[in-house]
Amino acid sequence: MIRILWLIPAIPVLAAGFIALLKRGQRKLAATAAIGALGVSLVMSVAAFASMLGNSGLQVMNFRWLQFGTQWISLGWLLDPLAAIMLVMVSFVGLLIFIYSIGYMAEDENFTRFFCFLSLFAGAMLAVVIANSLLLLFMGWELVGLTSYLLIGFWYHKPEAAAAAKKAFIVTRVGDLGLLLGMVWLYGSTGTLLFYNHGAGCLEHGALAVLVAHTTIGGMAVSTAIALLIFLGAAGKSGQVPFHIWLPDAMEGPTPVSALIHAATMVAAGVYLIARVYPLMSITVTPGTISTALQVIAWIGAITAFFAACIAVAQDDIKRILAYSTISQLGYMMLGLGVGGVAVGMFHLITHACFKALLFLGAGSVIHGCGGEQDIRKMGGLRRFMPITFVTYASGMLALCGFPLFAGFWSKDEILHAAHGWPMSLGPFYLGTAGALLTAFYMMRQVYYVFLGSRRTADEAAEAAAKAADETTAAHGHATAHGHGEPHESPAVMGIPMIILGFLAAFLGFVGTPAWPWFSDFLTGQTTTLDFGRFGEAGLLPLMAVSSLMVFAGLGLGWWFYGRKPIVSASQPDGLEQAMPPVFGALRRRLFVDELYAVTVVRLVRWGSALADVFDRFVLGGLAGLMALLVNGLGHIDNSLDTHAVNGGFDLGCRELATGGRWFAAWQSGRVQTYLRTIGIALIVLAVMLLWWGKA
Amino acid sequence: MNSIGPLTLLTALPIAGAVLVLILKRAQKLSRAVAIVIAVAALLATLVLWARFDSAAPGMQFQEVHTWAPSVGLTYHVGVDGLGILLLVLSAVVVLMSLAASWRNASHGPVYFALVLLLEAGLFGTFTALNFLHWFIFWELTLLPAFFLVRLWGGPQRGRASVQFFFYTMVGSVALLLAFLALYLATGTYDFTTLAQMAQNGGLAAALQQNLHWGGWSGGHIALILFWAVFLGFAVKTPVVPFHGWLPDTYSEASSETTMLLTGAMSKMGIFGFLRILLPIFPAQMQEMLTPLLWLAVASIVLPAFAAWRQKDLKRTFAYSSVNHLGYCVLGVCVAAKLTGVDPSLAIEKSAALTGVLLQIFSHGLTAAALFWFVALLERRSGGLRGLEDFGGLRKIVPVFCGLMGIAIFASLGLPGLNGFPAEFLIFKGAFPLAGWAATAALLGLLLTAVFLLGILQKVFFGPLGKGQLETKTDTNSSSLPAAMRDLSTTERFALAPAIALMFVLGLYPQLIAGKMAGTVTQWTTPATSATEAYKTTAPKHNAARLEAASGAWLIHRKAQAGKAQVAD
């Protein structure tokens, strides 16, 4: 298996290359190639997963890639339970979303290109999963970022989409540069970037001991510095505060993209990265203590979980609510990694991938059915028109809220349980619990607005039509085809993936209950036994009760604000807004984070570039101009010297020469008489002279 | 002594081609075709040399030595190591790309093509010469065709730009010449390898002190002055901030095809100088001046990246981007100069940085040339427009153009999988342990590069259609009829395809170049042990013996290769 593991990412990448060469009209071929390729990857992933069930040993395969001087950079891939489970999740959720996309993107003129990008994404993401080298992981990581960029900007004629794509790439790149720095530091300190290499990898004992033994600025262990830099990359990709700003804007992309990339897989890559390099994250100088890196991760995760949940409360765009919810859930995963370890964080990653993908697909179905409308205030009563969407959405929503027995309940509970037992502080636990309440609240609000109550689309039909007319070509080609009649249920090609995910959202949690903790046992390589006695562990049941209570309270509050009196009009102020306008206003403006960046970082960069430009144009240009003046001045002086002194002298000389010439010319007139006369005179003179001197 | 080696023939080829093109001047099409054929032949010749180049061997290969004018220390001495062979191939590639881009440019007549070929000859000569005077002749020889190419075929401000270009470069050249005259007076040789050896064993400073009586200065001080003079020559050419004042004007005023040559090949002459001359002959001075040098390198990375974001003109943006990319090379060279003592792990970092520099030389040449080629194509379609605000939503009407240019832009941005990434990674990998603060500061350059390149994508490719392509004028038909911009023709696609393919190949398999560079890099990073026997005899007194030895080495090498070929048969 390990020898051919590289094919899992390679096949979708090759499919992407193939689709790139197709013509725009070859839609069927494009979709078939993409789905077929990912299908093969899924089968291979499942086979890899199955091979891990028996023996959970780590398998690696390394090869030499690039030579510098006498040294080589090696890359490689690996298979362990962590990678296996991630492989299955990515290819499985990916495949469902690919299928869903056939329906959702059916009317789009760039259908083939869409599948090209999706396929490339899947390949890059799978490469991240199996990478056994931080460098290879980074390469896949950046490619994933590229496809995210391309897909957010898929409807490139929309300026917002173009801006959102750029923002996503640049914000995540800030984190990526931290990761790059951490990577070169790690490379320099340990001499390898391979994770595992039969004892010589950078995550193995020898290298870690070196990292811990050395200190850097401020007495920090090198391992801590590197771990924090790597976390910077993970935080950028996984939308942790303060890097979360790109993710809500990323919703400008087509909804399947939001489901696949910005909910289920790519944004979870940061969490996966931390899980992958967990030995580095958790290593400390004195064994038994909690590393600085993990403390930072736990706190950032908890803050993100709470902060994003707050903002989600006041959003009106169906996808933006889910986007903030995603940020919040990613915070939970980080919190889980920080306080509980790999299994805790990863379990939530897997369950979240299922139910959040489901929610996005449901949202897509709603948008599809409402002719491109995304504002939840203009929906309502949709449960009658789209029953399948409603039921599956409800399943996803309950899972997200952590409603007892649904998938999210088990995974979130494990995080809270671990946070409660964290020796450092109870702060993250309280933040997480409050976040759970908010989660239930905003999901209840959303469901009331979208599915329950009375239908408000009819009231605003005229307005919506006018608005949609502008955007038909832009936002959603589908709108033109179906017009704005009744909201309608989506076709089966979209419905079936939702149903499958709906089942998983309800039941997937049972692989990781306290009684049967298969998930964490699989990751750690133990055999699992069923033991209901584990529920009796100290504090477990009361904690479950508290968290369930939070969920019920959140749902109840949601009913209080939005369900008690039905929402009748889209322009009616929000229930919460009536209760506390300033808070709601601040939340709606997303707590002004974007504005904060605009007046700080963005302005700083602008000034920097203005300064650099001025420096070039005026300082350097001025210097060059001065030089030119100097040279010109010298030229002038030289010129006048030439005209007056040199040329003057020359002219004078010439005049003298001319006179002399005339004089000489007179001697050579060519007249023989003159010559004879001259010779005669000369002879006489000579004779006289000879006689005169001869006498003497 | 009468044998003429492959490097001489290689340099002669474009000169002969230029003459031929001028002879056939009347037959425009034929002369252009001849020029292209010559460029292809030159490329094939360099590739043959590349294939026969022994990557494991240290020192110069394909050497050739003839006496020329011994009275002034001028010897005809050519040879290439990894750096030289790499630059030969790159020059040939870039010249061919530039000529291919000029193919459809009606204003570029046979004279243009002939000048480009002359420039190619100058480049070949510069990259193979191992004697300063000989090298300097070619160094200046490239300047002449370049000056006329900018002067005669540029934009409205080309006169000013060409003079600026010439002036700046001349200042650098004069400084170089004076420095080497001083070196010659002190040591009696112009030979790079000999001078490098003298610098290694401390003979250079001693000779300077002994033979130059400059107001009682010590040899070290004189060497430092000479170092800065030589540095100035290369800093202008590369360019290093703040000696880059000529570049934005020249790159944007020259016709895009000429800019391809300037940025793709000629800018590498500066880096070549850093690696061939500055690093081996003035290592002690570089170590002494390391901090200011690193500041200059970081400034060359960060400031142009800032400035690029500010530009409203595609060519000016890419011009600044070019300074930024070469800044990484300067950074790599500077950290490689750091005095590290005997720590072997830092020697490894040096070899990483230097391999990165070599990869970056090629990678930047390829990418920058490709980018300006795309600008040329865009200019031709839009009637000369190249402002960022003139365009918008190009993806809608010219998707293939945008797709391919997008690949080039992402290569420039350093996306893994494309050619820029392995180079930049290796430079940072080497630079960080050697000069952590400089590497960290340089990261800002990587970020800003992404900002302005994606800004270009956003403005030009995305969004609604801009005015530039609604009123398109073609070259021949200058009526103002609004016509949709044409996408790349099949010919253009096939012309561009090899360049784009090469970006992928070098991104996924950089070993293609790095493998060839291994011997050279090893030699650079471990100079003491790798001085080969052939250079042991190199002392100015035994000039004749040295010539014998060196040409003997060339013959032996040729025989050895012939032997290898037989074995292979």
Image: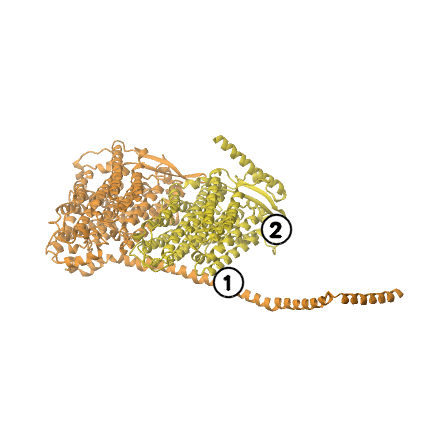
Chain colours: A orange, B yellow
Residue A561, percent across and down?
13, 55
Nearest to the observer: residue B412 or residue A595: B412
Looking at the rendering, which quadrant does residue B295 occupy? bottom left
A62 up-or-down from B430: above or below: above
A498 up-or-down from B480: above or below: above
Q: Is residue B409 left or right of residue A70?
A: left
Q: Please, which chain is the residue tagged with disc 2 on?
A: B
Work out how far the residue at label 1 is from the one at label 2, CA to CA, in angstroms: 31 Å
Q: Is residue A125 left or right of residue A482?
A: right
Q: Secondary structure at mark 2?
A: helix
Residue A473, percent across and down?
23, 54
From this viewpoint, is residue A557 visible? no
Question: Which amino acid type is shown beneath numbered disc 2?
Answer: Leu
Q: Please, which chain is the residue tagged with disc 1 on?
A: A
- The answer to whether marks 1 and 2 sit on the same chain is no
Q: Is residue A552 left or right of residue B355?
A: left
Q: Which residue is mark 1?
A: A627
**CB atoms of marks 1 and 2 within 8 Å:** no
Using the image, tell me which numbered label, if any, was put on residue B65: none
Nearest to the observer: residue A404 or residue A39: A39
Using the image, tell me which numbered label, if any, was put on residue B185: 2
Q: Is residue B394 left or right of residue A489?
A: right
From this viewpoint, is residue A489 visible? yes
Which tag is nearer the camera, tag 1 or tag 2? Answer: 1
Nearest to the observer: residue A684 or residue A143: A684
Question: Which amino acid type is shown beneath numbered disc 1?
Answer: Met
How many numbered marks are there? 2
Q: Quadrant of the N terminus of chain A?
A: top left
Residue A696, percent across and down?
89, 66
Callout 2 crowding tier (Cα within 10 Å): few <14, some 14–19, many ≥20:
some
Residue B310, percent across and down?
37, 59
Q: Secondary structure at mark 1?
A: helix
